[in-house]
Image: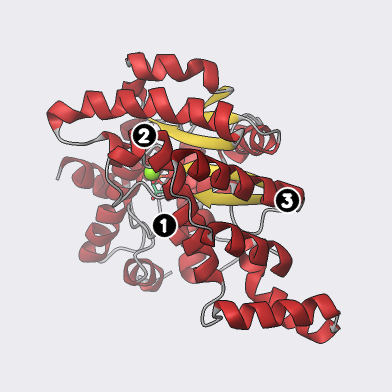
Amino acid sequence: MSQDLLNLLRDNGAFDPAPRHAELSDMHVPFDTLSGARNVEHALLAGLRAGNRIALLGASGSGKSSVVAYTLGPLVEGIFPIPVPVYPEPATVAGNGTEFVAHLVRTISRMLQATTPGLSRPAQQLEQRATAGGTGQRRHRISAGWRSAGLGPELAYELERAVSVPAPTAGQVLDQGRQILDLVAADGLVPILILDDTDRWLAATAPEIARVRREFFFTVPRLLAEDLGAAAVIAVHPEYLQDPGYQAAQGFLTDAIQVPAVPSAAAVGAVLARRVELARAAETPDVAEVFTPDALEVLYAHYTAWPSNIRRNILLPAHTALSLALDDGVDRIDEGHIMVAITS
Ligand SMILES: Nc1ncnc2c1ncn2[C@@H]1O[C@H](COP(=O)(O)OP(=O)(O)O)[C@@H](O)[C@H]1O
Ligand SMILES: [Mg+2]
């Protein structure tokens, strides 16, 4: 074995601690697989399909976004995931029901535009009529454009109409939000609101944090439960658990799922093996070609000292150690490289 594999991994940024969001799903090794239980990804999807509102608990870097990206990907049948961006929206969106719903409507409008590039509304209406006329070939061509969002052309058209209606009053905004979710549900899909990275709303400047967080948790879970009746997953940091706002939200959240820790050195190996597999496009990567068993043990011990931060305590040291091993001219990352990476 030469250094070729390590060079390839470095060139591909295989252990990049902060990959692009679009890559998270492919890189994810389900915690259910790592633990042999079905209490994370499986439970999350089952709960959301049942219409629940679920808090996904985990510290920064523990894998919340990764779990969500994997579990609620575009190819999962029967659901209509709606990632509600929390940035760069102002914090007022987080604490005001009407503004939150208006933001949701704008989000869906943008999703529709993104899934039908170059299709203006009049053109869409023409296509729609053609589709209604039942010319099989056209229908096929049109639906191919929507498929990535799990949308049929009729539903997309209905949604497009619903989001275009002006809603000047608070009551109308709420009705519009409800109507959109109803249209999705009537099409046999479960609309699921994804509120990931809420800390970006909640991490306003220091004196603001407590107020924004309180307003968010007092407003949004209740709105989702009582006014919209929507399934949702909300990423929650452990620090929020003591907040009066979060505690007040308990009655409106059906369930909480804790992102678990990676359970063993072998599981650390499985997470890293997935990255190796993606980088070299090989189906049966052997992580032992890249890390010595002791290297994985040291990584795992480091990770367990600061539980749950995969980004900072597994990927970042692995990423640094890869360069150190290449500098050393060896063909495997050993525990010495990991130890230097950890302390550097
Ligand atoms: N189960 C997992 N399998 C593989 N990689 C994971 C897993 N969980 C987390 N990661 C990786 O760890 C890093 C941090 O995960 P992320 O989901 O962004 O954490 P959080 O959203 O909780 O801050 C990402 O690079 C992600 O790819
Ligand atoms: Mg995240």
Residue 180, position as x, y percentages in the image: 61, 50
**Residue type, numbered disc 1:** His
**Quadrant the C terminus occupies:** top left
The colour scheme applied to this rendered structure is secondary structure
Q: Is mark 3 within 8 Å of ligand 1?
A: no
Residue 303, position as x, y percentages in the image: 34, 34
Q: CA distance from mark 1 to mark 2?
A: 28 Å
Q: Which mark is residue 96?
A: 2
Q: CA distance from mark 3 to mark 1?
A: 22 Å
**Residue type, numbered disc 3:** Gly
Q: Nearer the viewer, mark 3 or mark 1?
A: 3
Residue 100, position as x, y percentages in the image: 41, 41
Q: Which mark is residue 21?
A: 1
Q: CA distance from mark 2 to mark 3?
A: 30 Å
Quarter of the image for residue 146 reads bottom right
Q: Residue at x 62, y 40 (%)?
A: 33
**Quadrant the N terminus occupies:** bottom left
The crowd level at tag 2 (other Cα within 10 Å; few <14, some 14-19, many 20+) is: some
Q: Are marks 1 and 2 in contact (CB under 8 Å)?
A: no
The crowd level at tag 1 (other Cα within 10 Å; few <14, some 14-19, many 20+) is: few
Q: Residue at x 18, y 29 (%)?
A: 208
Most distant residue in the front direction: 168
Quadrant location of ligand 2?
A: top left
In this figure, which residue is indicated by the disc labeled 3? Answer: 78
Q: Residue at x 42, y 49 (%)?
A: 103
Marks 1 and 2, the one that precedes in the sequence: 1
Residue 137 placement, left or right of 90:
right
Front-most of residues 306 and 104: 104
Residue 334 placement, left or right of 231:
left
Q: Nearer the viewer, mark 1 or mark 2?
A: 2
Residue 317 placement, left or right of 154:
left
Marks 3 and 1, the one that precedes in the sequence: 1
